[in-house]
Image (spheres, rainbow, N blue to C red):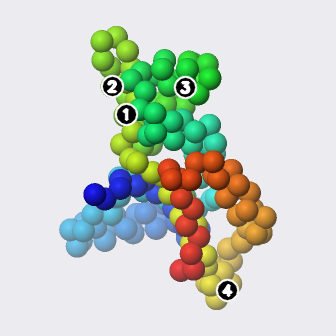
Amino acid sequence: MKVKTFTFKYDPNFSLKRMGEEIKEAVRTGKPSVHPDRIRYADIEDIMKEMSSTRLKLFSCLVTKKPQSLYQLAQLLSRDYANVWGEAKSLAQMGIIKLEKENGRIRPIPLYERVVFDFSVWTEKELLESQLQVEPPSFWRNIKRKAKNLIGIIYLNYDRK
């Protein structure tokens, strides 16, 4: 059975102009340019803002504990219901979970089994051509450290392109 995966992809060349070009190409060829299981970001900081450690923990708890309501999820996380509600709405807007009303309760349902952060490493030539800023190794170690407790749900991919 294939594991359903949602990917946050770091793509330093991603822009509105490039998105427009991809849409035109999709119309011309009939091949879809939208990938509902992936969000691309040109800035690593934006990825980390969108998928904060509290959202990662919430997602991990949904997948592993399968709570039947937001209230139960808040209890499992030992967090305030209002904060959990806000984080769950953000994850639902990204399409990572859905929120269903059942018997007067809101039930959070994960749409994926894992989240992947894809940070492809660029060659020196690509870096020089696109004038990209490379994050220091300590940055990558910090990301790995933050995700360490969520192994099995969160994967980091920063392979060479």
Which element is circle 1 on? strand
119 sits left or right of 101 in the view:
right
Residue kind at label 3, given as amino acid type: Leu
Q: Please name the residue that numbered disc 4 is placed on.
A: 124
100 sits left or right of 55 in the view:
left
Q: Which mark is first along the chain, 1 or 2?
A: 2
Foreground residue among 41 and 77: 77
Can I make out residue 90 in this image?
no
Which element is circle 3 on? helix
Which element is circle 2 on? strand
- Check whether the beta carbons of the residues at disc 2 and disc 4 lie within 8 A of each other: no
Q: Please name the residue that numbered disc 1 is placed on.
A: 109
Residue kind at label 2, given as amino acid type: Glu
* Circle 3 crowding by C-alpha within 10 Å: few under 14, some 14–19, many from 20: some
Mark in the foreground, 2 or 3: 3
Residue kind at label 4, given as amino acid type: Glu
Q: Residues under labels 4 and 1: Cα distance?
A: 42 Å
Residue that appears at 50% across and 25% down: 73
